[in-house]
Each structure stands twice: as structure tokens, then as C-alpha cells.
Image (cartoon, rainbow, N blue to C red):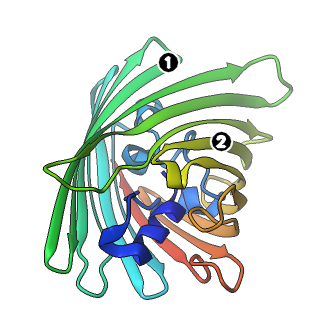
Amino acid sequence: MLLTLFALATFTLVEAQESALPTIDAQTLGMGGVSMTSTSDAHALFNNAAMASFSLFPAKLSTSYYGQADFDYYGISGYWRFNPNNTLQLGWRQYLREKGNNDSALDVGYGRRLGERTSLAVTGRYLMLKRYEEKSEALAVDLAAAYVQPLTDWKHYSTLRLGAKLSNLGGFLGHSELELPMEVKAGAALETFFSDQHQLTVGADLGYYFTPSDVRGFQAALGAEYNLMQLIQLRAGYHVGERKDYYPSFFSLGAGIRILHIRVDFAYLIAEKESLLRNTYSISFGLDF
């Protein structure tokens, strides 16, 4: 789920009828928010949990810091594929750390690989919003799917990735008037190896918030990543939102480096002067096991 809807909740405080979680992953943000086919497997739990089933590593761990104006966010997540077909994932996020707010979320996911090309996943989430002296709790479920198809007839070795997710199925506990922003999203990515040293990935997402009514609308993301020798990554992307007050448009730039089993990524968002996302950035650090 993209960070921009959550940015609005930052300013509407306890009267808000929505509470979305930010996309803190620097790789995803660097590509304009393309998340349904992201290869950042350790943060797949926050993007598309089904994608972790296709990782080349049996386990990964990542942590990210995301800064937006006077607010900051922090998250850590990882997965463990305990056999070829089953993957467990765990993640925690703390956000809205400003002016008495201290919200957090705990995610637990399970992915099941069905054959060589298809994977399904379910994620359960406990969400706690602490706004000044008030506290609200919510339970939600995400359902995700992924499909990977090698394109063997192409001149260069290529892979087509497809992903989809139905997110935030659930609600707040007790008599809270808050509502979770439910969204359906789908995406596709094409990954091509021109040689052992040069790799290009191009991806796109399309999502629709269908509840609550005051945030209803479409958003889309388009991004690309160039990978040099599996060591250096350069990224760029664009995100467009139908309702700029809830999910505004922005450009993004990003870079990454891989040294042995260590990953470091950075993303920076370029938005209009009046946008909540102006000068927003993300830094991610990860380990591959």
C-alpha cells in the first residue's frame, strides 16, 4: 500500500476515517511505488507477500527508515522459506512518530508456492493507533498472489512477473469511527538480462481504493531499475494519483548497492512544493542468508 494515503492521515489526526501504512521500502519507492512485483523480498510482506516464494535466498532480513517533513517511520521485516514450497514472514512498523503520535503495526504472513510459477499468500495485521491520549486497535488481512513466467523464446533471457493483492480486509475494534482503506492492486514487471553484467527491469502497478468513500479513487505507478553486475542499481519512477489530497503524484529517483550478502538502498521523492511528499526519502539496509 502506497505511503501517500497515509500522509493525509498524518494531518487529519483522530478525526480521520482512514489509516494506511506507508511503503517504506527504498527499492519500491525508487521505482515510483511499484510494489506488486518488487524483488525486495525481505519487505515483500509490506508489498506483495506472495513474491517472497520466488526468492533465490532461503531467508532475508531488511530494515528501512522513511523521513517525511517532521514525521518519520521505521520498519523491519524478513522471511524464512523452511522448505521449497512454504514461506513464513514477520514484520513490524512504527510510524507517525511526531506530536504525541506513536502508531505501530505487526504483520505475520504465510506464502505457499503452487508449482514452479504460482504463489499465494495471506497476511494478518494488528494495528495500533496512539493519537495523543487516545488509542485505537484494528485487525486486518491481506490476500496476495504472484505468477512468474520465463520468456525462453526471447533473444535475451527474460522473465515476466505478475502480482495482485486485496488489502486491509477488516476493521477497528470496539466503537471506533475510523475505517481501514481497503484497496485492490495489480501489477506486472518485465526483467531482462542483456548479458551477465547488464539487467533491466520495467514495472507498473494499478490500484483502486474502494472504501471509505472519501478516499475512493485510482492510483498508478511506473518504474524502472538498471542493475550493473548485480552490484549497483539505478532506479527511477513516477506515481500518479487520482485524488491529490490523498495520494498525490510524484517522481522518484533511487540507487542501491550489493556487496556479498549486504544490501543498501536509497530513494528520494520529487513532488510539487505544496505536496506532503516534498523532500521525502527512504533508506533500506538488508542481509541475505
* Residue 206: mark in rendering: 2
Name the residue located 13 percent from the left edge and 50 percent from the top edge. 174
Name the residue located 41 percent from the left edge and 23 percent from the top edge. 120
* Residue 148: mark in rendering: none
Name the residue located 56 percent from the left edge and 48 percent from the top edge. 216
Q: Which residue is mark 1?
A: 118
Query: How many marks on residues?
Result: 2
Q: Is residue 53 left or right of residue 134?
A: right
Residue 149, position in %: x, y?
Answer: 64, 21
Labels 2 and 1: the sequence-earlier one: 1
The amino acid beneath tag 2 is Leu
Decide if residue 221 is in sight here: yes
Q: Is residue 91 left or right of residue 3?
A: left
Residue 184, position in %: x, y?
Answer: 52, 36
Quarter occupied by residue 9: bottom left
Mark 1 Cα-neighbour bin, 10 Å: few <14, some 14–19, many ≥20: some
Label 2: state its secondary structure: strand
Mark 2 Cα-neighbour bin, 10 Å: few <14, some 14–19, many ≥20: some
Decide if residue 89 is in sight here: no
Quarter occupied by residue 255: bottom right
Camera-side residue of 271 and 236: 271
Outermost residue, right direction?
A: 155
Camera-near label (2 vs 1) is: 2
Camera-side residue of 188 and 181: 181
The amino acid beneath tag 1 is Thr
Label 1: state its secondary structure: strand
- C-alpha distance separating marks 2 and 1: 20 Å
Name the residue located 51 percent from the left edge and 27 percent from the top edge. 146
Camera-side residue of 154 and 127: 127
Residue 36, position in %: x, y?
Answer: 55, 40
Is 280 placed above or below 182 here? below
Give yes or no for contact between labels 2 and 1 (Cβ–Cβ under 8 Å). no
